[in-house]
Image: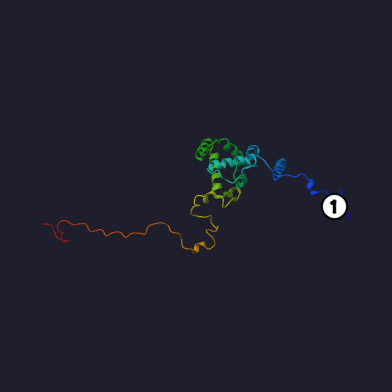
């Protein structure tokens, strides 16, 4: 049996160059950077395309999304819900495809809902109706149908309906569990209203003169 030292195929560990931990980390970082896993966050934010909720929307849907943000006054709307509402309005609202670009032409940067509605009202009565229909769809989560035209109402969203935001501090969305199962069996929270105070008796007003007997004729 040959000794390991005499075997030319056996390599002594001491023959490998020693690599410090610092050099190993630097080499690993270089490999990650080359593979695309390591980047400057600032440069990545400047070069990467926007990845917000409205990324990838079609131009018409993006216009509807921007109109919805302005006319409702809510900037945190769901882009996916906007796409569903737009599709439903194309089905149920006559002339929607033609009037949407007309309403979009009235948009101004930093515009408030009242200003957009006023501009739509001054431009065309149909644009005002469209603006109000968009608001109604977002607040009810439903695009109303027209029985005369053979269209049925389309429910687009439920929990995301904006009407529930108004009372969110004291009311949850109906059918949704509030404070855990059977929460209604617990005692209601204190309303922080002082207990009623009994009114103090009011003394009868003092009378003057002598009361006359009924039926007595004046002399």
The residue shown at (87%, 50%) is: 6
Q: Which residue is mark 1?
A: 4
Q: Identify the image quadrant of residue 16.
A: top right
In the figure, 216 relative to 121: above or below? Answer: below
Image coords of residue 152 (percent x, y)? 60, 51
Q: Residue at x 51, y 62 (%)?
A: 183
Left or right placement of residue 151 versus residue 165 in this view:
right
Q: Position of residue 169 (x, y in %)?
A: 49, 52
Secondary-structure class at tag 1: helix
Label 1, residues with CA under 10 Å away: few <14, some 14-19, many ≥20: few
Image quadrant for the N terminus? bottom right
Front residue (pair 10, 192)? 10
Q: Observer-nearest residue: 119 or 190?
A: 190
Residue for point 78% across, 47% down: 14
- Would residue 108 be found to the left or right of residue 195 on screen? right
How far across and how far down the image is residue 144, in percent?
A: 57, 49
Left or right position of 18 against 4: left
- Residue sitting at the far left: 219
Horizontal and vertical percent position of residue 205: 21, 57
> Residue 95: in sight, yes or no?
no
Q: Nearer the viewer, residue 51 or 24?
A: 24
Toward the bottom, the furthest residue is: 185
Q: Quadrant of residue 83?
A: top right
Q: Residue furthest right?
A: 1
């Amino acid at each position: 049996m040959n000794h390991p030292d005499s075997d030319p195929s056996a390599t002594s560990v001491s023959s490998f160059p020693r690599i410090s931990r610092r050099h190993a980390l630097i080499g690993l970082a270089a490999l990650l950077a080359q593979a695309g896993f390591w980047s400057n966050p600032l440069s990545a934010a400047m070069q990467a395309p926007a990845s917000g909720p409205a990324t990838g929307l079609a131009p018409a849907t993006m216009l509807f999304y921007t109109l919805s943000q302005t006319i409702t006054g809510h900037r945190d709307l769901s882009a996916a819900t906007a796409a569903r509402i737009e599709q439903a309005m194309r089905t149920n609202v006559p002339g929607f495809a033609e009037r949407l670009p007309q309403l979009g032409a009235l948009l101004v940067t930093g515009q408030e809902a009242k200003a957009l509605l006023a501009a739509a009202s001054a431009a065309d009565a149909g644009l005002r109706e469209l603006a109000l229909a968009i608001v109604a769809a977002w607040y009810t989560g439903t695009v109303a149908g027209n029985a005369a035209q053979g269209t049925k109402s389309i429910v687009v969203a439920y929990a995301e309906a904006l009407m529930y935001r108004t009372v969110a501090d004291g009311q949850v969305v109906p059918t949704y569990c509030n404070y855990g199962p059977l929460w209604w069996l617990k005692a209601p929270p204190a309303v922080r209203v002082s207990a009623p105070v009994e009114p103090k008796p009011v003394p009868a007003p003092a009378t003057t003169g002598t009361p006359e007997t009924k039926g007595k004729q004046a002399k």
